[in-house]
Each structure stands twice: as structure tokens, then as C-alpha cells.
Image (cartoon, rainbow, N blue to C red):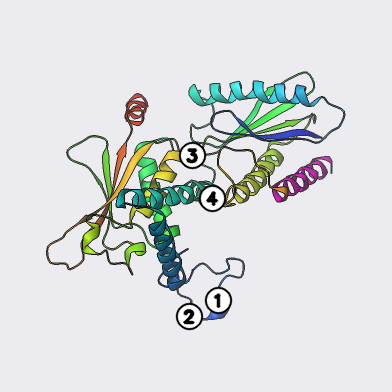
Amino acid sequence: MIGVGKMKQYSNVLDKPLNKGKQEVSLSAFAFLFSELVQYNQTQVDNIAELERRLEDAGYAVGARVLELLCHREKGNRKETRLLGILSFVHSTVWKVLFGKVADSLEKGTEHEDEYMISEKELLVNRFISIPKDMGTFNCGAFVAGIVRGVLDSAGFPAVVTAHFVPMEGQQRPRTTILIKFAEEVLRREARLGG
Amino acid sequence: MIVCVAVVGHQNNPLYIQSFTEADDALKLHHVVHCSLDVVDERVNNPKKSGPMLNETYLGLLYPTENYKVYGYLTNTKVKFILVTTDLDVKDADVRNFFRRFHAAYVDAVSNPFHVPGKKITSRTFAERVSTIVKAFGLSSAG
């Protein structure tokens, strides 16, 4: 529902479907709200790890509710039991509802079996944020990582989700990657289901 | 006549139980709901090849007891809705419709930022919406 513009352009305002209502939320309103969230949490904690954890917890609550809402609204009463199913659900449906577009890419990690990465050229939440140098590797995308963790956890796929900056050559701002590391039991269940 | 509806969390903890007749013993209804949880687990863990698809949310008639019929519905977050009714000729479509509206009310209740997931649902709005849905179900199946 957050979007930089309308999801579907109607040339004539009379063509807009009546019952859908307003699908978009003002980007600046969200940016202000998010910046207040970060500032409030910053006054409460002493170090960066704690700040990241708080943002993630905030995102976790959002993720759990988003899953309930989307399963009821979009999925047409189907459940996801397979790993790839839930990952593509997060990658397309969840991203589309939250940010107005699907995520840029979904990749499987090469080093470990249980790692997957969702990449985004620029996370919406990070658009108006620049991290001061002395904060090191802190990424406000921890909020989005928390959302993803909330969705996966509530769907029965416990995972550790973190957000990282990946510098790209030829671009000024680094790409953001959400790294998802699934728990052991998920892999075992996936193997048992015949993945 | 719907006797009782229940929402059970993913660790089989009760989140919301409401009975709609004064005649029956609340404890007995708790017991019936509890037994039906076993049936739900069995359905989920042993998918029958000829039965419903593994990723379908509506579970259908779980089991008939002496004078009740128990219907189940499982959401993606392992939250179960249990419906206990004394009607003998309930149409499948009616029950599906009931669960769809019940799911909508549940999603709205959970979206409340003051609701702690895993704790009982204490929203009065949710209780009112559920009784409205139950009354509508009674009218539609009778008429």
C-alpha cells in the first residue's frame, strides 16, 4: 500500500473502481513516521545492535499481521507449505502490497544450503535515510528484515533474517540484500516432503 | 443452530471460545473443541491421497458426535477455527461462507496493534462481529 505513485494509472477518474478505495499511502507520511520510529528507538538504546534488534522486532509484528491479511485477501484460501512457495510469496505478493512492486531478485545462496537472498536496488525505507559513518554497518533495512522474519515465522518457517549493504560497481548507492537463513527443521521438513 | 465457535492458536492454546446456547455445559463444549483438535492434526499430518489438497484451508466436517457436527478451518499461520453446530442439514457452501467471514473478522482483530499474538482475543468488536455472523448463518440455513 506504500507507493511512490498509483499502482495502476487511470486516465479518467470516473474509470476508477468505486469499491477499491485509496490503494496508495503518501510516501512522505511514511518516511516521516519511519524516521520518527528510528529516532525514538535511538534515544532508548545504548548501542547499534540493540537499535537493530528493536527495528527488527517492530517489523516482526508487522510481518505476522501482513501474513494473516494477505492469506485471507490475496491467496484465495491456499496455504504455503513448500520453501520455494513461501519465498516466492514473500518476494512477489508481500513486496507488491507493501512497496508497490515486486522485489528485484531472489537468489539461492551458493555457500550454504539454507541461505536465500532477496535483493533490492534501493529499499523504500532507506530512501530518505543516510547512515552516518560512525554507525558502521547498521542498516535501517532491519525493519524490512523483521517483516520478512515475521511472515516466515508465522507461516511455520523459522529463519534468521538480516539486511546488508552490498556495494555495486558503477553505482553510487550500494544495493540492499535481505539474507534469509532457514532453521534446521525447515530443511529437514522440506527434504521429507520430497523437495 | 450454531452451538459454539472457537479459535485455537498454533500451539493449541485457546484464543477465543464463545458459546451461543445457554442450555449446554461450557465444559462439554470445551471438551468437544479439544477433541476436534486431534482430528485437525491428523488431517494435516497424514494427507490422504484422495482427500483435499494439502494446502487447502477449509477442512470440512471433522467428525460428528452424539448430536453435534464439528467443522474445521486451518489458516496459513496454523490458527484453527472450530465450528460446532447442531444442524443436521448444513450445506457445505454455507459453512465455507461462514468461515470466510469469520476469517475476515479474525484478521481485523489480529491487525489491532494492541493485540498480542498468542494471547486471548479480547476485542469487543470481534465478539460483536462474530455474533452477527453467527446470527446470519442461522438465518441463511433455516431459510
Among all residues in the image, which is located at the extreme top?
B66
Real-space Cα separation, disc 3 to disc 1, in angstroms: 34 Å
Picture layout, residue A142 above or below residue B93: below
Q: Quick check: do tags 3 and 2 share a chain?
A: yes
Q: Distance between the residues labelled 1 and 2?
A: 8 Å
Q: Do labels 1 and 4 share a chain?
A: yes
Mark 3 and mark 4: Cα distance apart in space = 13 Å
Q: In percent of the image, x 38 and y 41: which residue is there?
A: A85
Q: Depth check: A6 or B15 in front? A: B15
| Nearest the eye: A58 or B59 | A58
Residue kind at label 4, given as amino acid type = Leu
Q: Is the magenta stretch mostly helix, strand or loop?
A: helix
Horizontal and vertical percent for residue A4? 40, 71
Q: Which of marks 3 and 4 is nearer the N terminus?
A: 4
For the C terminus of chain A, the quadrant is top left
Q: What stretch is highlighted in magenta?
A: B125-143
Cα separation, mark 2 vs mark 4, equals 30 Å
Q: Residue B129 colored magenta?
A: yes
Identify the amino acid type marked 1: Asp
**Residue annotated with mark 1:** A15
Q: Name the residue under label 3.
A: A79
Q: Does the magenta stretch include residue A105?
A: no
Q: How many labels does the image show?
A: 4
Mark 1 and mark 4: span between their CA atoms? 27 Å
Residue at the left extreme, as displayed: A169
Picture coordinates of residue B70, whole percent (x, y): 70, 27
Q: Which mark is residue B25?
A: none
Q: Is mark 3 on a helix, strand or loop?
A: loop
* Residue displayed at 76% across by 23% down: B27
Q: Can residue A7 be seen in this view?
A: no
